[in-house]
């Protein structure tokens, strides 16, 4: 009769048989008891065999005895399935986001990792790839690393790999290369006046309402509520490989009503009467030939207009940044900035609050005026 020996807290059990040899057994993840295919001369050998099986279970590499080994999945195969099924907040990826990820994979990630079994990719492999990839384009480099890290994190949670090999601290973020100098109120006015009349208001809304390009180019007559003095942002347009596509704003927070500064109401009324069709779904800023306005078409005119203000450094998106800084300068709270700009996280809105701190000299001057007025009373 076999004599069982099992220390408390150890994995499996070792039995000594009447022959003096040892037999090892354990319960696998399938709930069944499995025996070693052979017996062992020494108890230590039986225990070593059990330790190997335990390590396989911990590393998700265990298979029932006799089972066919699972085919090795390459990174490219796994990434394709990941991209096809990826959801954010329970929704599929936006078309532009999916295209961006696909381009990063095709051009910067899969040339190195595509044919490798995903389980074989090590931290050293990732460090070597990162050191040689997009070294002159830090933002794109951060995007590529962030995508690789996210895919590998999903693979780890799926049990495809033991742990995420993307462990480079800070590699998923990049310092801003282009330092934004917000446009002043005077510069915004000069640029708007220098634009073709049908797009002048677009500059004002981009700045004073801090709206995104895709939100502006999908605005329609029905979205302008002059009674309540708000612009109702409900949609955006993006340009994909298949052409223009109307979609929702960048995030759920992007669906919002943006209050119109009263000084813009006359300009909006003039624009609606001169440049917008009478139907409710008429675009506010259509292309010359109709349909949605292409970025390149607008930018050509914008570059000429910004030169009139001596602001060749100003990008179109910087108008939104300028408007956000103006809003922050009014003393708006972080929550109020997030609501106005359509941000779902506070980090981006905080950037504009920090930028508004440049008014500190003006604030100090105003404090001195307060002191002088009290001294005169």
Image (cartoon, rainbow, N blue to C red):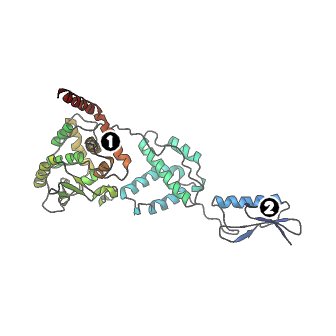
The residue located at (45%, 62%) in the rendering is 84
Q: Residue 45's image quarter?
A: bottom right
- SS for callout 2: helix
The quadrant of the picture occupied by the C terminus is top left
Rendered location of residue 80, percent (x, y): 48, 60
Packing grade of label 2 (10 A; few <14, some 14-19, many >=20) is: many
178 versus 61 height, above or below: above
Residue 95 image label? none
Q: Is residue 117 visible?
A: no
Q: Name the residue under label 2.
A: 46
- SS for callout 1: helix
Query: Is residue 286 or residue 146 the one in the foreground?
Result: 146
**Is 185 positioned to the left or the right of 357 in the image?**
left
Packing grade of label 1 (10 A; few <14, some 14-19, many >=20) is: many
Mark 2 vs mark 1, CA separation in Å: 66 Å
189 versus 166 height, above or below: above
Evaluate if marks 2 and 1 touch, with contact meaning CB atoms under 8 Å apart: no
**Is 263 positioned to the left or the right of 86 in the image?**
left
Q: In this view, which residue lies farthest toward the front? A: 377
Rendered location of residue 316, percent (x, y): 27, 44
Rendered location of residue 268, percent (x, y): 14, 51
Badge 2 or badge 1: first in the primary sequence: 2
Residue 353 image label? 1
């Amino acid at each position: 009769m076999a004599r069982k020996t099992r220390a408390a807290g150890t994995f499996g059990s070792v039995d000594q048989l009447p022959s003096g040899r040892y037999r090892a057994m354990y319960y696998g993840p399938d709930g069944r008891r499995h025996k070693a295919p052979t017996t062992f001369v020494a108890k230590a050998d039986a225990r070593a065999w059990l330790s190997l099986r335990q390590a396989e279970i911990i590393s998700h590499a265990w298979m029932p005895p006799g089972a066919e080994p699972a085919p090795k999945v390459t990174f490219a195969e796994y990434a394709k399935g990941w991209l096809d099924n990826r959801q954010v907040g329970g929704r599929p990826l936006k078309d532009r986001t999916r295209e961006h990820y696909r381009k990063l994979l095709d051009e910067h990630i899969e040339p190195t990792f595509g044919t490798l079994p995903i389980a074989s990719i090590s931290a050293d492999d990732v460090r070597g790839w990162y050191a040689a990839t997009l070294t002159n384009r830090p933002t794109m480099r951060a995007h590529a690393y962030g995508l690789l890290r996210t895919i590998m994190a999903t693979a780890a949670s799926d049990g495809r790999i033991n742990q995420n090999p993307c462990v480079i601290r800070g590699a998923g973020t990049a310092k801003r290369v282009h330092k934004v100098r917000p446009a002043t109120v005077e510069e915004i006015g000069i640029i708007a006046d220098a634009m073709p009349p049908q797009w002048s208001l677009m500059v004002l809304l981009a700045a004073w309402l801090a709206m995104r390009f895709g939100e502006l180019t999908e605005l329609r007559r029905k979205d302008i509520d002059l009674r309540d003095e708000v612009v109702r942002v409900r949609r955006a347009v993006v340009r994909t490989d298949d052409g223009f596509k109307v979609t929702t704003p960048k995030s759920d927070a992007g669906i919002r009503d943006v209050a119109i500064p009263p000084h813009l109401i006359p300009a909006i009324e003039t624009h609606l009467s001169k440049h917008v069709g009478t139907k409710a779904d008429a675009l506010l800023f259509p292309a010359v030939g109709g349909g949605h306005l292409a970025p390149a078409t607008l930018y050509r005119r914008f570059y000429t207009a910004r030169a009139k203000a001596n602001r060749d450094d100003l990008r179109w998106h910087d108008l939104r940044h300028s408007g956000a800084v103006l809003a922050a300068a009014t003393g708006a709270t972080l929550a109020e900035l997030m609501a106005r700009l359509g941000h779902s996280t506070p980090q981006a809105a905080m950037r504009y609050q920090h930028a508004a701190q440049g008014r500190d000299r003006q604030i100090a001057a105003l404090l001195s005026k307060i002191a002088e007025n009290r001294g005169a009373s």
